[in-house]
Image (spheres, grey):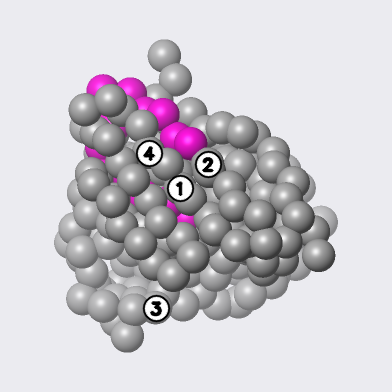
């Protein structure tokens, strides 16, 4: 299995809602990542988990809260988002944090 | 300075044509990857190519690490090749994957 899965594929939420994005991989990778991508731009790194510990937080606003419950699963909890947070959210994983990264299909988020 | 730079930014081809995409990268960037982002947003791994040459079907890539560039060759292009091609490399300073701005390819039937 060489796949990273993400759910949901699409999400529409209001500014007062709380929602979560989920990412899963069963490749035995020990590094997992969240990226945010706006239209016509490259992905921007948000968070890195290495061996289930948060190793990089790119000064992301606290309305985004990552969680890594185990080595296969990565969540991104969303609360009180702004319309400018609408974007494609991509999850990735790699064997370790200096190796080739593999991306999931993304969650397209719209904040109303 | 610019860490990962791609050219051209946009490319329009007729189906069946060949093309070469270029990625220049700084001294502090290594372990190049090439991705294709399809119209649905999925980033598909094409090559992990820190150095040397690799081929996969109609696609091939060459990285000359000593000269800090990588090339992606697409031969006999098809409409399904359309999308955005990104190269990305790992920063030895920060450990982060640094993306270029992408090349948007449109293949016309």
Q: Which residues are magenta?
A: B22-35
Q: Are marks 4 and 1 in contact (CB under 8 Å)?
A: yes
Q: Quadrant of the N terminus of chain B?
A: top left
CA gap, disc 4 and disc 1: 7 Å
Q: Which mark is residue B21?
A: 2
Q: Is residue B78 left or right of residue A64?
A: right
**Residue B16 placement (x, y as % from top left):** 67, 62
SS at circle 2: strand
- The relative height of residue A15 versus residue A24 in the rendered view (above or below) is above
x 63%, y 61%: residue = B77
- The relative height of residue A70 versus residue A53 in the rendered view (above or below) is below
Per the image, the residue denoted by label 4 is B70
Which of the two discs, 4 and 2, labels the residue nearer the N terminus? Answer: 2
The residue lying toward the viewer, choosing from A84 and A96, is A96
- Please tell me in which quadrant of the rendered image residue B42 appears: bottom right
CA gap, disc 3 and disc 1: 24 Å
SS at circle 4: strand
User: Are discs 1 and 2 located on one and the same chain?
Assistant: yes
């Amino acid at each position: 299995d060489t796949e990273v899965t993400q759910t949901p594929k699409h999400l529409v939420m209001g500014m007062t809602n709380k929602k979560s994005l989920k990412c899963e991989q069963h490749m035995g990778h020990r590094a997992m990542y969240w990226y945010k991508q706006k239209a016509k731009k490259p992905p921007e790194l948000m968070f890195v988990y290495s061996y289930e510990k948060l190793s990089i937080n790119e000064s992301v606003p606290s309305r985004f809260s990552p969680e890594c419950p185990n080595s296969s699963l990565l969540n991104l909890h969303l609360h009180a988002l702004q319309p400018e947070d609408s974007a494609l959210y991509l999850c990735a994983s790699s064997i370790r944090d200096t190796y080739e990264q593999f991306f999931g299909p993304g969650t397209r988020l719209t904040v109303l | 300075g610019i860490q990962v730079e791609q050219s051209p930014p946009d490319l329009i081809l007729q189906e069946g044509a060949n093309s070469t995409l270029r990625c220049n990268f700084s001294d502090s960037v290594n372990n190049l990857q090439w991705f294709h982002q399809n119209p649905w947003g999925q980033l598909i791994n094409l090559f992990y190519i820190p150095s040397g040459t690799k081929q996969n079907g109609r696609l091939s890539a060459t990285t000359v690490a000593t000269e800090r560039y990588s090339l992606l060759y697409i031969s006999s292009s098809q409409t399904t090749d359309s999308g955005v091609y990104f190269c990305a490399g790992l920063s030895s300073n920060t450990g982060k994957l640094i993306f270029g701005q992408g090349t948007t390819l449109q293949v016309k039937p």
